[in-house]
Amino acid sequence: MRKQKYFSRFTECNQMHRHASRKEAARCNELTLLEKAGQIEKLRQQPKFVLQPRFELNGRVIRPIIYQADFSYYDKERKAFVVEDVKGYRTRTYMIKKKMLLYIMRTREDWLFEET
């Protein structure tokens, strides 16, 4: 098994999804139970959000900037779409992409960002 950065270990949750850490796998199990109980819906694993689309400049293609969260779902009680990231170590890249995502979504009242 390949070692990961920051000493986390790939772990499978009860749904047989592969996660980057034990903490993330445990959170997946919790969210799956909440979905089965009807408290949340539309649970997604590793959703991607385009922070800056691909574009061309002087004939050169510039790749898009993508933020990949750990989970997203709709919370029925709070009536909000939740983007959730399970974090152990916050890298500089993560902090910058998080700020870009928060900036893009700042005007949406039905949207929440959570770190666990």
Image (cartoon, rainbow, N blue to C red):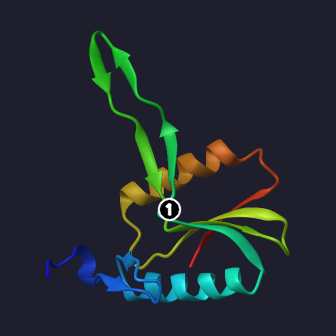
- What's the amino acid at mark 1? Ala
The residue at the point 48 percent across, 35 percent down is 52
Q: Is residue 52 left or right of residue 42?
A: left
Local crowd at mark 1 within 10 Å, few (<14), some, or many (≥20)? many
The residue at the point 16 percent across, 79 percent down is 3
Whether residue 36 is situated above or below residue 45 in the rendered picture: below
Quadrant position of the N terminus in the picture: bottom left
Most foreground residue, 20 or 93: 20
The residue at the point 49 percent across, 68 percent down is 70
- Residue 65 placement: quadrant: top left
Q: Position of residue 30 (x, y in %)?
A: 60, 88
- Residue 78 placement: quadrant: bottom right
Whether residue 41 is situated above or below residue 7 in the rendered picture: above
Q: Is residue 47 left or right of residue 57?
A: right
Most foreground residue, 68 or 40: 40
Most foreground residue, 116 or 95: 116
Q: Position of residue 115 (x, y in %)?
A: 57, 73
Q: Position of residue 29 (x, y in %)?
A: 54, 88
**Label 1 sits on residue:** 69
